[in-house]
Amino acid sequence: MKAKIKNALELMNDDELDALLEMCEAKQDPNEERKIKYDVVFNRPNNYKPQEISFDEINNYDFSKGFTEYIISNDFVHLYFDFDSIKNEEEFESVMKWLEKLK
């Protein structure tokens, strides 16, 4: 598996590597719960306070209600293609192939 990760890193361009390193180095208070700010409609007043949901709670969210994320900062963006776990090399290869198709 380490060789696969090494190969994936070697395929990344400088900008992608810089972004990955920046995410890894981001300092965050370990006691702070990360929240996603969102709403179910567009066109709210500027002073409207968006709803919040945790990164764990979103796994059970009913997206048929609507979901528009407020991008507050790069550190708190919820990826719409996150993975809770990758259990083996075959799953890792499958994820990498899928991400390559998205690119």
Image: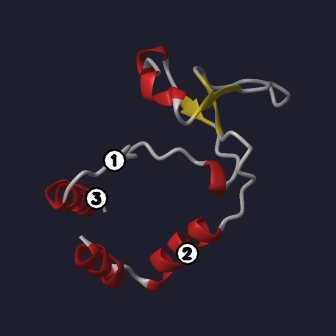
- Disc 3 marks a residue whose amino acid type is Leu
- In the image, what residue occupies the spot 70% across and 46% down? 72
Residue, disc 1: 85
How far apart are the two marked residues, 3 and 2, measured between alpha carbons?
19 Å
State the residue lying farthest toward the left.
90
| Mark 3 Cα-neighbour bin, 10 Å: few <14, some 14–19, many ≥20 | few
Q: Is the residue 90 above or below the residue 64 in the image?
A: below
Foreground label between 3 and 1: 1
State the residue lying farthest toward the top.
65
Q: Which quadrant of the figure has residue 69?
A: top right
- How is the structure coloured here? secondary structure
Secondary structure of the residue carrying numbered label 2: helix
Secondary structure of the residue carrying numbered label 1: loop
Image mark for residue 21 = 2
Image mark for residue 99 = 3
Quadrant where the C terminus sits is bottom left
Image mark for residue 72 = none
- Disc 2 marks a residue whose amino acid type is Leu
Foreground label between 3 and 2: 2
Foreground label between 2 and 1: 1
Q: Horizontally, is 22 left or right of 50 in the view?
A: left
- Disc 1 marks a residue whose amino acid type is Ser
**Residue 38 at what x, y percent from top left?**
62, 30
